[in-house]
Image (cartoon, rainbow, N blue to C red):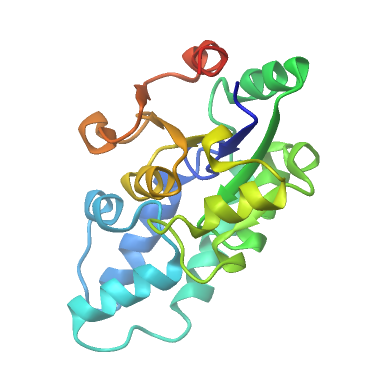
Amino acid sequence: MTGLVIFDNDGVLVDSERLANTILAELLTEAGLPYTFEETVRDFMGGSMASMRQKAEARLGRALPADLEDRYHQRLFDGFANLRAIEGVESVLDHLEARGVTYCLASSGTHRRIRTALTAVGFLDRFEGRIFSAEDVAHGKPAPDLFLHAAASLDVKPADCLVIEDSPLGVAAAVSAGMKVFGYAGMTDPAKLSDADTVFHTMAALADLIDGA
């Protein structure tokens, strides 16, 4: 039986990936590294801003503007005024609570970003005390550190955890952590989530999948 369900945030709980990747593509292009929305999804989705900077600077051959992250978050948080939860995910949380299954959040985003997003969609109270960020560990996804940190903090063995992810980096991190992982192909090419134990396309299917895990 699953002892802990670990949700990614962006693209799994909150419908923020399109906005976030659009802003990132604009800022990288302004900095002299032309990027399209599709390319930012391909190269950076699911990773931390620190890993994005490292990869982008290696490609650009010089440093990105020092304030890029600040400008990114300002535009992102302005857009969060219209943020919505992923359709159907609130019913999944209701289902888990009714069954007494513990769940938490483990995201590559900063704590500020996570809490701002959860507040915007009314989920903050549901995750309070069980929010884990890449800021909490030395190595973000695809390293297993974040998921292992979440499991250890809630005293659950990795083998008893189920991760819900929508990015290849997140799936890789869960597999490396020795956890079962379901890949949500809401915005991601299902083929890129092929290392997941199960790939699903709609949140309406998730509650039954968790029950069968």
Residue 173 pos. (x, y %) = 40, 50
> x%, y% of residue 31?
29, 78
**Residue 79, visible in the rendered structure:** no
Name the side, left or right, on which 73 lies relative to 96.
Answer: left
Residue situated in front as seen by the camera: 107 or 13: 107
Residue at 68 percent across and 44 percent down: it is 118
> How many marks can you see?
0
Is residue 44 in sight in this rendering?
Answer: yes
As drawn, is 29 to the left or to the right of 97? left
Q: Is residue 41 left or right of residue 49?
A: left
Considering only vertical position in the picture, is 106 above or below 212? below
- Judge whether 99 appears above or below 169 on screen: above
Pick whichever, 191 or 44, lies toward us.
Answer: 191
Near-viewer residue (102 or 156)? 156
Q: Residue at x 51, y 38 (%)?
A: 15
Q: Residue at x 47, y 13 (%)?
A: 205
- The x and y percentages for residue 189 are 24, 33
Q: Position of residue 132 (x, y in %)?
A: 64, 54
Q: Residue at x 27, y 72 (%)?
A: 55
Quadrant showing the N terminus: top right
